[in-house]
Amino acid sequence: MKYLLLFLLLPITPSCSLAQDGVAYPVTVHVFSSHRFGSYQSLEVDIDGTGYQLLGPIGKHGLLDLGDYQAKLVKDEHRSKEWKAAYEFILPDKKTRKFSVTGKTKLTAIFIPLETATKDSDADHVAQSQTQPPQTRKPN
């Protein structure tokens, strides 16, 4: 009876569920854009250097924040040159949320954090230009 009562008290929503113990989420997903479309949210993410657009439900507390998440591929169907895919994210509170892949793109920009950039990189040049005052021309 106690177990039945506990089961009935667990929140059950269509947007998320609790992760099962021992289930691996091996894919690192970097979310760099999050938008709202009615009761859905659209994410732009980087998975292993490939850009994807994902669509899923908005959570109880709003949009998914930007940053890194662990996920697993839960749907991967290929037919000729067409495919369908979906990922399940595990959130910090151990709840999960499923997102369907709605688009795929090649990422062309390379983001290098300033603290990890090498001395000869463009990021170092940008850092130097931000610390030096702009040069002004003297009138003739």
Image (cartoon, rainbow, N blue to C red):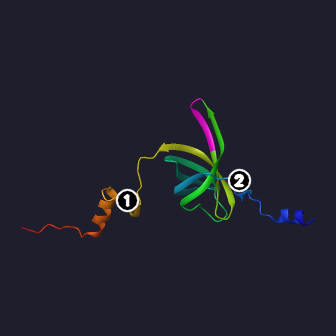
- Residue 92 painted magenta: no
**Regarding mark 1 in the picture, which secondary structure is present there?**
loop
Residue 4 sits in quarter: bottom right
Q: Mark 2 is on which residue type?
A: Val
Q: Nearer the viewer, residue 102 or 26?
A: 26
Q: Earlier in the sequence, mark 2 or mark 1?
A: 2
111 left or right of 29 in image: left
Q: Which mark is residue 88?
A: none
**Residue 23 x %, y %:** 71, 53
Give the position of the C terminus as an image quadrant: bottom left
Q: Residue at image x 32%, y 64%?
A: 127
Q: CA distance from mark 2 to mark 1?
A: 36 Å
Residue 92 sits in quarter: bottom right
78 left or right of 120 in image: right
Residue furthest to the front in view is 119
Q: Label 2 belongs to which residue?
A: 23
**Residue 108 x %, y %:** 41, 47
Q: Nearer the viewer, residue 67 or 9?
A: 67
- Residue 84 painted magenta: yes
Q: Mark 1 is on which residue type?
A: Ala
Q: Does 22 sit above or below residue 101?
A: below
**Residue 70 x %, y %:** 61, 56
Q: Nearer the viewer, residue 35 or 129?
A: 129
Q: Residue at image x 56%, y 62%?
A: 65
Q: Label 1 belongs to which residue?
A: 117
Residue 116 sits in quarter: bottom left
